[in-house]
Amino acid sequence: MSKKILIDLAKFRDPKDGNYNFGECIYNFHPNNIGMKDIVEKAMILFTCRQCEDSPCILVCPEEALEKNDDGFIVRATNLCIGCQSCVAVCPFGSIMNEVFTSKKSICDLCDFNDNTESLKCMETAPKGAITIVDFDENKEENIHKLNDNILVKEFIWDKLMKNE
Ligand code: SF4
Ligand code: SF4
């Protein structure tokens, strides 16, 4: 079985002061890039957004930077987003993190992650346990869900919580 990067969303937040630490990154072309924000943005939309029918986040955006894709997921055009955080404030479910929806686009190229990878720069600098390398697959019973072929995300899925499962 091939290795995967496991992201535990809750662990990025310091329980004492509430601040987020997504780790450091070494993306060559953008030295100030924090690639993990790119992954967290995708995970946030996939696992916490309720896909509201009227999507107040889309309506409030002054730059028309948000839209729904064909599958009903919110997509942000980062070239339009000015980081005003209006969507963060209006989302009734807290599905959009202000730490992630800045106007800047973060990029994660997975640092050439493969089966021989032992560690990642972000893994060394993010809070302990937030980013780990594992050799198992999606396990919904353990709240571990597939984001893509390389990444698993540990998160409580809202519709499961609603049904008290
Ligand atoms: S933060 Fe970006 S996406 Fe959100 S409302 Fe402002 S411009 Fe639109
Ligand atoms: S308001 Fe929040 S929950 Fe509703 S569609 Fe927008 S991001 Fe998703």
Image (cartoon, grey):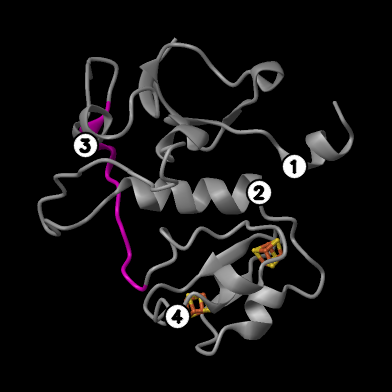
Q: Nearer the viewer, mark 1 or mark 3?
A: 1
Is ligand 2 within 8 Å of the beta carbon of the residue shown at mark 1? no
Q: Is residue 1 above or below residue 70?
A: above
Of the numbered discs 3 and 2, the one sitting upstream in the chain is 2
Q: CA distance from mark 4 to mark 1?
A: 26 Å
Instruction: Tell me where the magenta segment starts and ends, as one range.
Output: 103-113
* Mark 1 residue crowding within 10 angstroms, few (<14) / some (14–19) / many (20+): some
Residue ID at (57%, 83%): 61
Image coordinates of residue 132 in percent, x first then y, are 36, 22
Which mark sits nearer the N-terminus, 2 or 1? 2
Residue placed most toward the observer, 9 or 115: 9
Predominant SS of the magenta segment = loop
Q: Tell me the quarter of the picture where residue 91 sits.
A: bottom right
Q: CA distance from mark 3 to mark 2?
A: 26 Å
Give the percent coordinates (x, y) of residue 7. 44, 31
Q: Quarter containing ligand 2?
A: bottom right
Q: Which residue is mark 3?
A: 111
Q: Earlier in the sequence, mark 1 or mark 3?
A: 3
Q: What whole-number distance in Å separates the C-alpha atoms at marks 3 and 4?
A: 30 Å
Q: Position of residue 78 (x, y in %)?
A: 40, 72
Q: Residue at x 23, y 19 (%)?
A: 117
Q: Which residue is mark 1?
A: 158
